[in-house]
């Protein structure tokens, strides 16, 4: 199936209503891994289907199908129309408020070194080499190197001539070393498993993947000998690969407008944020500047239009600490009467678009890493998330990291293991004391953000520098 064939098949018998959209999704993925020197079974697959959405007489209905023949698409259109007629007068918003899809355009990931430019044998040889270099000592009891590549293509068609074609290349590299001694186990990974990007094999060079294995293995061993993280209230310096989860859980999810409106209440929870906070609530210190930006080259959730066909634009969500706008798509904006962003996103052809994070980024400040360390009399530096817990209002949280380093009298001193910290979203960001400059910035992301009923697993990007917080409750594994 190609987008052109899909378009031809659909238009042979388009939905029998004046307003409709059709979204085709084609995904091809390949997962390669070498564990303890052994090539793992290769996972490869193709997934293709379409969702037809129709608007009729004040109702909306949608149907998904993997039968992309003219007959299959006609049946899906008829089913969607039937659901639209059943929902008429029962919606909590008016479909007439939505702008019809009229845009035409294309978005494409840039891949300087396409996935296919290196043969399978070359990719496996590279992974075998990286896996072997993770084994830096006998106490490394497990080690693995992997690559996950996805080629995804979407086509959105509209009844008023809209046509949006987008083609994405996703790459997720991973390294993991597990050390064990006398019943104790410590794990070190490549940025906490949250390195997802758009692009080709050049991403591996940009991220330092090819040189990371010996360091990861050595740090896993180092953690076996390290003392446990101390407990107490102290300053906390978070590396970029931990900041991405802090942003994700305590800013991103609380600001999803459908969640604020109650859609996730019986599944993933609600939010401590309420509609009246936008425009007046102080979310953090004046150093906190969060942007929704689907236009960052190479970031995993970059796109030209969301899955409803809304043009993607950079928007401040929080500026100088002040909460400005929610992460709400066109439908949620119509329900709430608030301005949002272009974030209607679906995880595939058989899921409807819902409000999701895309690229949600913390803008860099002007503090060098060494200056943030020098400003701390007693504190701790933490890297790479390995555990997280947050309440169903996305407010009280507790995070654990793979590695910590004590900061004493303005200097990084001893490595500590099992570092954890806890806080409350509504007050934590107000303790933000310094934001790292561009030299500390990393463009990271995760392919595993879950939300929605039925569940949707989504790619989400976070570009962030390191950041310093004052007076945070820190504790070790024994606490």
Image (cartoon, helix red, strand yellow):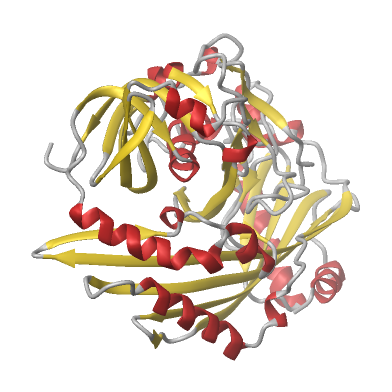
Front residue of 42 and 133: 133
Q: Position of residue 44 (x, y in %)?
A: 54, 82
Residue positioned 48% across, 26% down in the render: 372
**Quadrant assignment for the C terminus:** top left
Q: Is residue 340 above or below residue 175?
A: above
Front residue of 154 and 251: 251
**Quadrant assignment for the N terminus:** bottom right
Q: Is residue 332 left or right of residue 247?
A: right
Q: Residue furthest left?
A: 182
Q: Residue furthest top?
A: 280
Front residue of 70 and 430: 430
**Location of residue 422 by image quarter:** top left
Residue positioned 49% across, 17% down in the render: 284
Q: Position of residue 368 (x, y in %)?
A: 56, 30
Q: Position of residue 160 (x, y in %)?
A: 89, 49
Front residue of 446 and 328: 446
Residue 395 in view (yes/no)? no
Residue positioned 80% across, 69% down in the render: 10
**Location of residue 192 by image quarter:** bottom left
Q: Is residue 218 above or below residue 467?
A: below
Q: Is residue 245 left or right of residue 152?
A: left
Residue 266 in view (yes/no)? yes
Q: Is residue 56 left or right of residue 255?
A: right
Q: Position of residue 247 (x, y in %)?
A: 49, 35
Q: Is residue 213 above or below residue 435?
A: below
Q: How many marks?
A: 0
Residue positioned 70% across, 81% down in the render: 116
């Amino acid at each position: 199936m190609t987008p052109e064939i899909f378009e031809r098949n659909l238009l042979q018998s388009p939905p029998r209503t004046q307003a409709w959209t059709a979204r085709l999704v084609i995904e091809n993925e390949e997962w390669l891994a070498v564990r303890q020197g052994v090539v793992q079974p290769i996972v490869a697959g193709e997934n293709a289907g379409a969702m037809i959405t129709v608007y009729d007489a004040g109702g909306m209905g949608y149907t998904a199908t993997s039968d992309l023949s003219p007959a299959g698409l006609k049946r899906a259109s008829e089913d969607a129309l039937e659901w639209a007629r059943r929902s008429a007068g029962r919606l909590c918003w008016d479909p007439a408020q939505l702008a019809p899809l009229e845009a035409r355009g294309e978005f494409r990931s840039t891949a300087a070194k396409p996935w296919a430019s290196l043969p399978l044998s070359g990719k496996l040889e590279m992974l075998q080499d990286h896996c072997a270099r993770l084994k830096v000592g006998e106490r490394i009891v497990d080690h693995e190197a992997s690559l996950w590549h996805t080629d995804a293509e979407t086509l959105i068609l509209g009844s008023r001539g809209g046509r949006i074609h987008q083609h994405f290349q996703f790459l997720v590299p991973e390294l993991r070393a597990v050390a064990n001694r006398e019943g104790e186990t410590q794990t070190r990974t490549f940025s906490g498993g949250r390195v997802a990007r758009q692009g080709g094999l050049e991403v591996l060079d940009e991220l330092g993947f090819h040189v990371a294995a010996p360091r990861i293995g050595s740090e896993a061993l180092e953690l076996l000998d390290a003392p446990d993280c101390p407990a107490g209230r102290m300053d906390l310096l978070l590396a970029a690969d931990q900041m991405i989860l802090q942003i994700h859980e305590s800013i991103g999810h609380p600001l999803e407008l459908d969640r604020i409106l109650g859609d996730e209440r019986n599944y993933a929870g609600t939010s401590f944020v309420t509609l009246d906070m936008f425009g007046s609530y102080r979310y953090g210190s004046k150093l906190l500047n969060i942007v929704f930006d689907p236009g960052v080259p190479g970031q995993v959730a970059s796109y030209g239009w969301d899955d409803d066909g809304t043009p993607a634009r950079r928007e401040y969500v929080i500026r100088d600490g002040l909460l400005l706008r929610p992460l709400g798509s066109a439908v949620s904006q119509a329900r709430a009467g608030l301005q949002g962003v272009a974030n209607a996103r679906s995880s595939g052809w058989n899921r409807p678009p819902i409000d999701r994070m895309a690229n949600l980024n913390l803008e860099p400040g002007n503090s060098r890493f060494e200056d943030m360390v020098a400003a701390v009399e007693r504190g701790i530096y933490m890297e790479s998330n390995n555990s997280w817990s947050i309440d169903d209002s996305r407010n009280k949280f507790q995070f654990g990291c793979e590695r910590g380093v004590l900061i004493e009298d303005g200097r990084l001193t001893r490595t500590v293991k099992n570092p954890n910290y806890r806080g409350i979203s509504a007050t934590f960001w107000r303790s933000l004391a310094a934001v790292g400059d561009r030299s500390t910035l990393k463009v990271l992301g995760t392919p595993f953000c879950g939300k929605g009923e039925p569940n949707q697993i989504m790619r989400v990007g976070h570009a962030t520098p390191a950041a310093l917080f004052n007076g945070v409750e820190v504790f070790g594994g024994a606490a």
